[in-house]
């Protein structure tokens, strides 16, 4: 075996045939400088690059929108006054109330946020809607089947429930000339404050139920019966 320790022998080891190593000489074609792009070609290449970037951005935006529709884009933020529903079946008829539930959030409610002596929407955002599939009695007030709007007139003493025939309006829109009637509400003590305003049907029998409005430390209700 040859010793490749010296420079001459290294050359011979790299040339196993034993011939003298010939250095590589590039041809004229191989020495030609790289071709330069025409300015119009460079513009075309830039346009293609921009188009590719725009496609990527559009795809990202579309994916984000799809994720939002599917609930995966970002966590939903809790609504300040979330929508709520109260429903009961009475004498074969269904009574449903749609409303939004405002929260205390450290505020004084009765006599403060909800002033005494002024009509209140009894909820938040859209007007509170009552839907009944049959005629009913709210206290002594006859309420026909159909859709109505509920308001209240708060007081430090006796509250009144207002049944109004105007529907579909924002909660701050109140037209007294559209009142079907007003019913005095009874009071019931509360042992602790309630953060969110609620409407609920309670103590229901085959022919009667109580509609309660609770918020803070106030509980006011009316009795509803089948005529």
Image (spheres, rainbow, N blue to C red):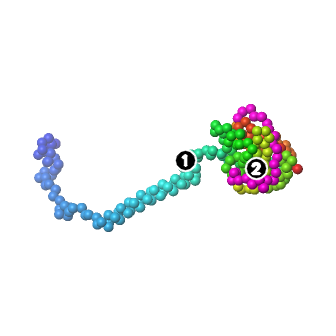
Callout 1: SS: loop
Q: Nearer the viewer, residue 183 or 20?
A: 183
The residue singled out by tag 2 in the image is: 150
Q: Is residue 94 magenta?
A: no
Image mark for residue 74: 1
Q: Is residue 174 magenta?
A: yes
**Quadrant placement of the N terminus:** top left
Above or below for 129 versus 48? above
Stretch in magenta: 170-193
Q: Residue furthest top?
A: 191
Q: Residue furthest front?
A: 117
Write the residue at 70% across / 35% down: 193
State left or right for residue 124 relative to residue 180: left
Q: CA distance from mark 1 to mark 2?
A: 36 Å
Residue 134: tell me if it is visible. no
Image mark for residue 137: none
Reading the chain from its start, which is encountered first: label 1 or label 2? 1
Write the residue at 58% across / 46% down: 76
Residue 80, quarter of picture: top right
Question: Nearer the observer, disc 1 or disc 2?
Answer: 2
Residue 57: tell me if it is visible. yes
Neighbour class for label 1 at 10 Å: few (<14), some, many (≥20)? few
């Amino acid at each position: 075996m040859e010793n490749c320790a010296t420079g001459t022998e290294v050359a011979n080891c790299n040339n196993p045939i034993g011939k003298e190593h010939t250095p590589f000489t590039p041809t004229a074609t191989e020495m030609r400088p790289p071709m330069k792009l025409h300015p119009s070609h460079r513009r075309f290449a830039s346009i293609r690059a921009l188009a590719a970037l725009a496609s990527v951005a559009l795809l990202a935006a579309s994916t984000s929108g799809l994720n939002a529709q599917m609930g995966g884009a970002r966590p939903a933020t809790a609504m300040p006054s979330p929508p709520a529903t109260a429903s009961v079946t009475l004498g074969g008829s269904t009574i449903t109330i749609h409303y939004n539930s405002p929260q205390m959030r450290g505020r004084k409610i009765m006599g403060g946020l909800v002033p005494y002596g002024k009509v209140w929407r009894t909820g938040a955002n859209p007007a509170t809607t009552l839907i009944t599939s049959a005629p009913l009695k709210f206290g002594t007030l006859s309420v026909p089947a159909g859709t109505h709007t509920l308001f209240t007139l708060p007081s430090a003493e006796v509250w009144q429930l207002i049944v109004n025939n105007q529907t579909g309006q924002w909660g701050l829109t109140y037209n007294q000339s559209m009142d079907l009637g007003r019913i005095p509400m009874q009071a019931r003590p509360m042992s602790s404050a309630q953060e969110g305003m609620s409407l609920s049907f309670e103590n229901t029998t085959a022919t009667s139920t109580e509609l309660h409005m609770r918020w803070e430390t106030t509980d006011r209700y009316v009795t509803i019966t089948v005529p």
